[in-house]
Image (cartoon, helix red, strand yellow):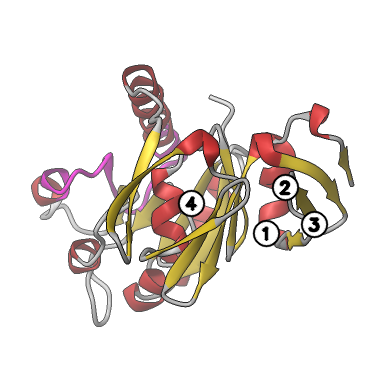
């Protein structure tokens, strides 16, 4: 499994963060994209960033872990990390990958990571890459072939989906579009942009040029590493 896995820690205890960060640093394919100390901050992060896996505490001030998940239409995978044994059955009822009780030994943590990777491999083997996506426009729900999409740009409460010589304004967030597009064909390069890998003409410093388009797109610092890992050298990458 060579795909980088974007993670976030959601826990109100700094000591828990210290342990989990230390453990994740031993597993370089798991990339820590954020550390949140309450559910409200986590919900804000999840609305803008693509996260694959959450390490989630349950008892937190304000919104607890279960309530936080209930507010997400399409939540990432979850590994609960808690000091309480009482909620294990409920955790698995909401689709948790694992339930870790503090203090968490590294061997048990590593077992959870392996379980996540095994589930992702199994999912990839049974899931076909979609050929189109349905998006809401002023003309209603429209179907668009994925291979014809050049890039996607955030536009207020909408997104612009660019094709060869036109774009469609669609009612969706960039993060929602990112979840619909296959990771092997598209890459998030900025909080406001997603690009088709096959349509990349040139990458230079922190700018990217797309076939048929003269304007450059910005590359966010936190997204550049993933882009360079995904991009095909034949696209003429220059760093």
Q: What is the span of residues highlighted in magenta in the rendered image?
A: 91-110
Mark 4 or 1, nearer chain start? 4
Q: Please indicate whether residue 82 sits to the left or right of residue 177 in the image.
A: left
Residue to which mark 2 is pinned: 225
Which of discs 4 and 2 lies nearer the camera? The answer is 2
> Residue 151's x, y, as percent?
59, 51
Q: Residues within 10 Å of mark 1 (few under 14, many from 20)?
A: few
Q: Quadrant of residue 184?
A: top right
Residue to which mark 4 is pinned: 7
Q: How many marks?
A: 4
Q: Residues within 10 Å of mark 3 (few under 14, many from 20)?
A: few
Residue at 33% from the left image edge and 25% from the top image edge: 123
Q: Secondary structure at mark 2?
A: helix
* Cβ atoms under marks 1 and 2 closer than 8 Å: yes
Residue to which mark 1 is pinned: 222
Q: Residues within 10 Å of mark 4 (few under 14, many from 20)?
A: many
Residue at 56% from the left image edge and 33% from the top image edge: 3
Residue at 24% from the left image edge and 67% from the top image edge: 68
Q: Quadrant of residue 211?
A: top right
Residue to which mark 3 is pinned: 214
Which of discs 4 and 1 lies nearer the camera? The answer is 1
Mark 4–mark 2 Cα distance, whole angstroms, equals: 15 Å
Q: Nearer the viewer, residue 238 or 54?
A: 238
Q: Secondary structure at mark 4?
A: strand
Mark 3–mark 1 Cα distance, whole angstroms, equals: 24 Å
Mark 3 or 2, nearer chain start? 3
Q: Please indicate whether residue 59 sits to the left or right of residue 154 in the image.
A: left
Mark 4–mark 1 Cα distance, whole angstroms, equals: 13 Å
Which of discs 4 and 3 lies nearer the camera? The answer is 3
Which of discs 3 and 1 lies nearer the camera? The answer is 3
């Amino acid at each position: 499994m060579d795909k980088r896995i974007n993670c976030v820690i959601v826990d109100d205890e700094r000591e828990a963060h210290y342990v989990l960060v230390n453990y994740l640093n031993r597993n370089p394919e798991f990339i820590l994209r954020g550390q949140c100390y309450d559910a409200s901050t986590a919900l804000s992060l999840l609305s803008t960033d693509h996260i694959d896996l959450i390490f989630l505490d349950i008892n937190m001030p304000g919104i607890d872990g279960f309530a936080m998940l209930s507010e997400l239409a399409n939540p990432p995978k979850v590994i609960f990390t808690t000091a309480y044994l009482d909620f294990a059955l409920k955790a698995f009822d909401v689709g948790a990958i694992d339930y870790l009780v503090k203090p968490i030994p590294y061997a048990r943590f590593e077992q959870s990571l392996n379980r996540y990777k095994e589930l992702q491999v199994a999912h990839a083997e049974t899931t076909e890459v979609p050929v189109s996506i349905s998006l809401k426009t002023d003309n209603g729900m429209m179907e668009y072939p994925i291979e014809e999409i050049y890039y996607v740009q955030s536009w207020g409460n909408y997104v612009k989906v660019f094709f060869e010589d036109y774009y469609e304004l669609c009612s969706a967030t960039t993060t929602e579009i990112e979840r619909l597009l296959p990771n092997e064909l598209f890459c998030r390069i900025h909080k406001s942009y997603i690009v088709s890998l096959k349509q990349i003409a040139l990458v230079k410093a922190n700018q990217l040029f797309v076939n048929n388009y003269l304007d450059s797109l910005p590359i966010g610092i936190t997204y550049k590493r993933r882009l360079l890992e995904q991009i095909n050298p034949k696209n003429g990458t220059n760093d």
